[in-house]
Amino acid sequence: MSSDAALPDPADESGSLDLDVRTLPHGARHDVIFARLQALADGETFVIRNDHDPKPLRYQTEALWPGAFEWTYLEAGPLQWRVAITRAD
């Protein structure tokens, strides 16, 4: 995905980047999130908002980059999930 203009990029109250993937086409969500993950500096965090538990994304991320990211659930449904993802390496 090459259009950064379509990516929401507001800072939330903690100063981390907040990405509401509910506004993105389903087929593009993982690519957008992976691009954000790769752009994170060590110790940097961003928060994803989703309409379902992003557990499959977590498994895929761990398979691609074992141990590189820490996931912290900030909100766990039933209508919205918010997960802070921090670059750990």
Image: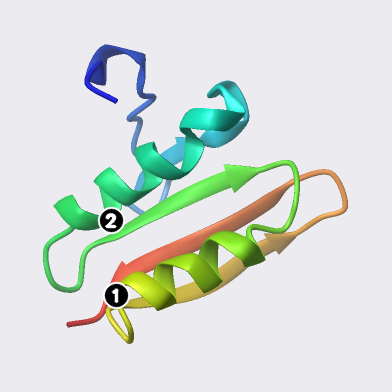
Residue 12 visible in this rendered orientation of the protein: no
What residue type is disc 1 on?
Trp
- Does 1 sit above or below residue 33? above
Mark number displayed over residue 37: 2
Q: Residue furthest right?
A: 78
Front-most of residues 12 and 69:
69
Q: First in sequence: mark 1 or mark 2? A: 2
What residue type is disc 2 on?
Leu
Q: At 58% from the left edge and 44% from the top edge, which residue is drawn?
A: 49
Total labels: the figure holds: 2
Question: Which residue does the numbered mark 1 point to in the structure image?
Answer: 65
Residue 2 visible in this rendered orientation of the protein: yes
Q: Residues within 10 Å of mark 1 (few under 14, many from 20)?
A: few
Name the colouring of the figure.
Answer: rainbow
Secondary structure type for disc 2: helix
Q: Are marks 1 and 2 in contact (CB under 8 Å)?
A: yes
